[in-house]
Image (spheres, rainbow, N blue to C red):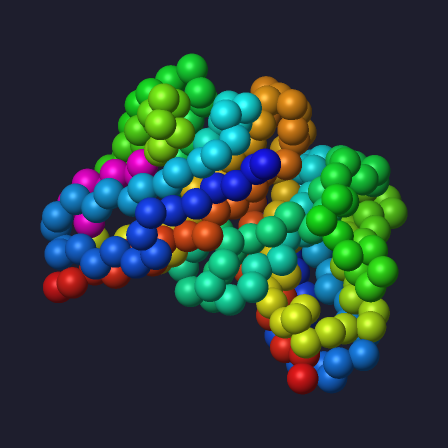
């Protein structure tokens, strides 16, 4: 079946350090993965995506890594800032499906 | 560019009452989604439209939930009668196009928070 889960529900990081948020997925047919950020009281906001023919993709201060062998992806945030405090969701889409399925989220908190 | 608009932002009703939520997607976006987000969980897709046609409504509780997008632009989501477990944030999102080549970049509204007492 389709399911996307996360290893840790909460993550506390020192300001300025790098953050790593992990996500496991179970549907081997999924070929497209997305990370979203959701701040309190707002809708999710697209951060970065990656297709299954890639294992790494970089954006501005963010990097997504995909390991298809163990069905795992991660979001790395460099030099974490207070504005990065939010809940982060990984999401997936299968090659034959049009819908995007969200995981349960990791809350990232920043220590000053 | 205007974002996805939703109303009302907050609604409190008693169980067995009805409620309706409205969504206006980003201009030109053909695909519209309604997600339900229960506190502490990720968004769950209820229904997905491509223009005014339904692409996926497999997770929509059709005995009480209904949604329409009559002219392929605005959409309404209705719950009748509401149950306590329907308390959640209802998120509307839109994207430019649907399909295997489409990106996963959904643009979300701020959501409508429903409390059922």
Nearest the eye: A2 or B114: A2
Describe residue A58's horizontal placement relative to residue B68 as left or right: left
Tell me the quarter of the picture where residue B64 sits.
bottom right
Residue at position x 77%, y 57% in the image: B61
Residue at position x 86%, y 44% in the image: B71
Nearest the eye: B95 or B88: B88
Nearest the eye: B66 or B72: B66
**Magenta region: which residues?**
A74-80
Q: Is B87 situated above or below A18?
A: below
Residue at position x 76%, y 73% in the image: B82
Residue at position x 68%, y 69% in the image: B86
Screen quadrant of the C terminus of chain B: bottom right
Q: Percent position (x, y) of residue A100?
A: 58, 38
Q: Percent position (x, y) of residue B46?
A: 69, 51
Whether residue B101 can be seen here = yes
Tell me the quarter of the picture where residue B65 sits.
bottom right
Whether residue B76 can be seen here = no
Asked if the magenta segment contains residue A75, the reply would be yes
Name of the residue lying farthest toward the top? A53
Q: Percent position (x, y) of residue A60?
A: 28, 35
Q: Percent position (x, y) of residue A41?
A: 47, 66
């Amino acid at each position: 079946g389709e399911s996307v889960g996360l290893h840790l529900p909460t993550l506390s990081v020192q300001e300025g350090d790098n953050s790593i948020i992990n996500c496991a997925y179970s549907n081997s047919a999924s070929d497209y993965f997305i990370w979203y950020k959701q701040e309190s009281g707002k809708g999710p906001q697209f951060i970065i995506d990656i297709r299954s023919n890639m294992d790494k993709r970089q954006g501005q201060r963010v990097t997504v890594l995909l390991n298809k062998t163990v069905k795992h992806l991660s979001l790395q945030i460099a030099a974490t800032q207070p504005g990065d405090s939010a809940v982060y969701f990984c999401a997936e889409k299968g090659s034959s499906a049009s819908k995007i399925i969200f995981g349960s989220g990791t809350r990232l908190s920043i220590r000053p | 560019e205007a974002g996805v608009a939703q109303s009302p932002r907050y609604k409190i009703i008693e169980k067995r009452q009805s409620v309706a939520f409205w969504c206006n997607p980003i201009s030109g976006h053909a695909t519209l989604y309604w997600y339900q987000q229960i506190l502490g969980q990720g968004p769950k897709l209820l229904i997905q439209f491509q223009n005014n046609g339904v692409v996926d409504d497999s997770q929509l509780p059709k005995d009480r939930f209904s949604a329409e997008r009559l002219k392929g632009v605005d959409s309404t989501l209705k719950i009748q009668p509401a149950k306590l477990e329907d308390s959640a944030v209802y998120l509307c999102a839109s994207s430019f196009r649907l399909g295997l080549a489409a990106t996963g970049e959904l643009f979300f509204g701020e959501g409508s928070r429903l409390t059922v007492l």
